[in-house]
Amino acid sequence: MKTISLLSQKGGAGKTLLSVNLASYAASQGETVAIIDIDGQASSCVWHDEREDTEELPEISVISSQPKRLPNVLKAAKKGGATFVVIDTSPNSEGATLEAAKNSDFGLIPCRAALADIKAIRSTVDLIKIANIPAGIVINACKTKGLAYDAQTALGVYGLPIADVVIGDRTPFNHAFTSGLGICEYEPKSKAANEIRLLYQWMSSK
């Protein structure tokens, strides 16, 4: 079983959106997938509520959990046959972020291409270093290629791998989410879907 966590101390980075999209794509690739939602807002659970009303989709289990219960929930997921687990974390909680990181095989840090966001992930990077796990950064919800290039340059200071794919600021992501779908299910031939596929492949290589 492989476990990844979406980590960012800053709200609005897009952790949940990437969580459900990576999870749904993994399910389409034959993985038995679970999402563990440790964010008090339980947005992944809300997405799953909509998904349950849609037939003929790969099954994805979504579990709401307290951060301290993560080791137990992960053991249960493995016993239940899960092969790919995504942990959707909460912002502004060092304890929850560190607990998720310690229980993951890989930490993915989404970051918007704005100076405030780039500076704000320093605390997340520090927590990942404490957890001592492989990790990387992906630029998320980016509006232009120029902004992406500038952000990639600025993020180099953290010494972590940066995904070579940039996730664009695309409306179909929101439409898919409200339908309980991943973008690769909602618009499989779209640029947004291709970005998720490329991110999944990049992350798998790490």
Image (tube, rainbow, N blue to C red):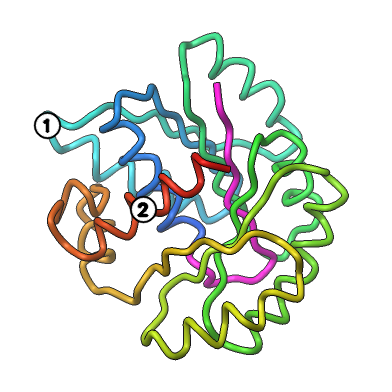
As displayed, is residue 114 above or below residue 186?
below
Amino acid under label 1? Glu
Disc 1 and disc 2: Cα gap in Å?
A: 26 Å
Residue type pointed to by label 2 = Leu
> Residue 130: where, in percent of width, then height?
88, 49
Mark 2 = which residue? 198
Query: Callout 1: 10 Å neighbours few (<14), some, many (20+)?
Result: few
Residue 5 position, x and y percent, is 60, 45
Look at the image and tell me in which quarter the N terminus lies. Answer: top right
72 relative position to 65: left or right: right
Q: Nearer the viewer, mark 1 or mark 2?
A: 2
Question: In the rendering, at what x and y percent does residue 21 appear?
Answer: 35, 49
Q: Which residue is drawn at 34% across and 76% down?
A: 169
- Give residue 35's position: percent from left, percent from top: 47, 36
**Residue segment shown in magenta:** 1-14
- Label 2 CA crowd tier, 10 Å (few <14, some 14–19, many 20+): some
Left or right? Give the position of 173 relative to 56.
right
Disc nearer the start of the sequence (1/2):
1
Determine which residue is flagged by label 1.
Answer: 55
Measuring 31% from the left and 41% from the top, which residue is drawn there? Answer: 25
In the image shown, does 86 or 89 lie closer to the viewer? 86
Residue 193 drawn above or below residue 152: above
- Left or right of residue 164: residue 185: left
Q: Which residue lies furthest to the right in this view?
A: 130
SS of the residue at dot 2?
helix
What's the mark number on residue 146?
A: none
